[in-house]
Image (cartoon, rainbow, N blue to C red):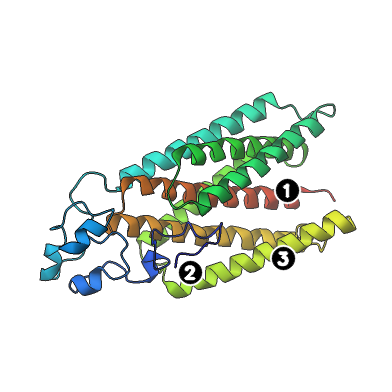
Amino acid sequence: MRSRNPVFSRRGFSRDNGYAGFNTAPQAGGPAVATQGNPYAQPTGDQYAQNPYAQNPYAQQDLQHGAPPQAPATTGRMTIDDVVLRTASTLGVLILTAALSWALLPIDDANISRSYGIGIGAALIGMVLAFVQSFKRKASPALILTYAAFEGVFLGVVSNIVDNRIADGAAMQAVIGTMAVFAGVLIAYKAGWIRVNRRFYGFVMAAALGFILLMTVNLLFAVFGGGDGLGFRSGAMGVIFGIVGIILGACFLALDFKQVEDGIAYGAPREEAWFAAFGLTLTLVWIYLEFLRLISILNSND
């Protein structure tokens, strides 16, 4: 069954067999092999009527000659252009609201508490929306764009505070760092230097869960015990965990690229491109915040 984890269930398009890319990757070898684990395989005969994604019952006949599965030449199938367009739309909304909150929510001594409160409230709303979308079986463009809008408000406020009160230019440095990680992982993935398989997926998920658990415990100690909690987000330990967080974000990007590649190869419906946009946005926000946190620690006078 598909994972119901509200954070990680977005990784991959498989409906019934977990992460599609880790069941049977698109390859030659006949229909019995090529369609195994593919939730969008084009069946023939009686199965055609039972598949809600089936567009062409004859689309798989080339597989009998050993050809690798390709996205069917029919309308309504996801392409890389669909992913790029929807990701650009989602990030565009996020950047716009971040810029507006930066400009309209002052962080002077008289208003910083109110602006920070609005930012935290927006972050909580964005988190709830992200969880709701993660539990949904179908992508909701309105929900994803609304999440991006609230997340942008939070990023705008936090970035403004860090940039003006802790480290001048931190926001731009974090943006450049995020773009560099994205470009680096994309190049490494396309060159085959990163092999995303079941073992890679399991390692990343285990590391991410451990990382989140430690950060949660650290936060609880900080809230109820005061100070920096267990010290995982300050000093030398904070720098180490900041670097680990960025590395995990890079691993998530590799999973996102695999998700997109599998979705196109398996002939996923066009609306699934919103899932890819949602996943990429979550990952880029993660990396940006880790960079911002790391820059803050390195420039802190504490």
The x and y percentages for residue 142 are: 48, 36
* Label 1 crowd bin: few (<14), some (14–19), many (20+), radius 10 Å: many
What amino acid is found at the position of numbered circle 1 in the picture?
Answer: Ser
Q: Earlier in the sequence, mark 2 or mark 3?
A: 2
Q: Give the residue pinned by disc 1.
A: 296
Identity of the residue furthest to the top in this view: 104
69 horizontally vs 220: left or right: left
Up-down relation of residue 6 to residue 127 (above or below): below
Q: Give the residue pinned by disc 3.
A: 214
Helix, strand, or loop for circle 2?
Answer: helix
Q: Which residue is found at the position 67% from the left and 58% from the top? A: 242
Kindly report which numbered mark, 1 or 3, lies closer to the viewer in this rendering: 3
The x and y percentages for residue 80 are: 32, 47
Helix, strand, or loop for circle 3?
Answer: helix
* Label 3 crowd bin: few (<14), some (14–19), many (20+), radius 10 Å: some
What amino acid is found at the position of numbered circle 2 in the picture?
Answer: Tyr
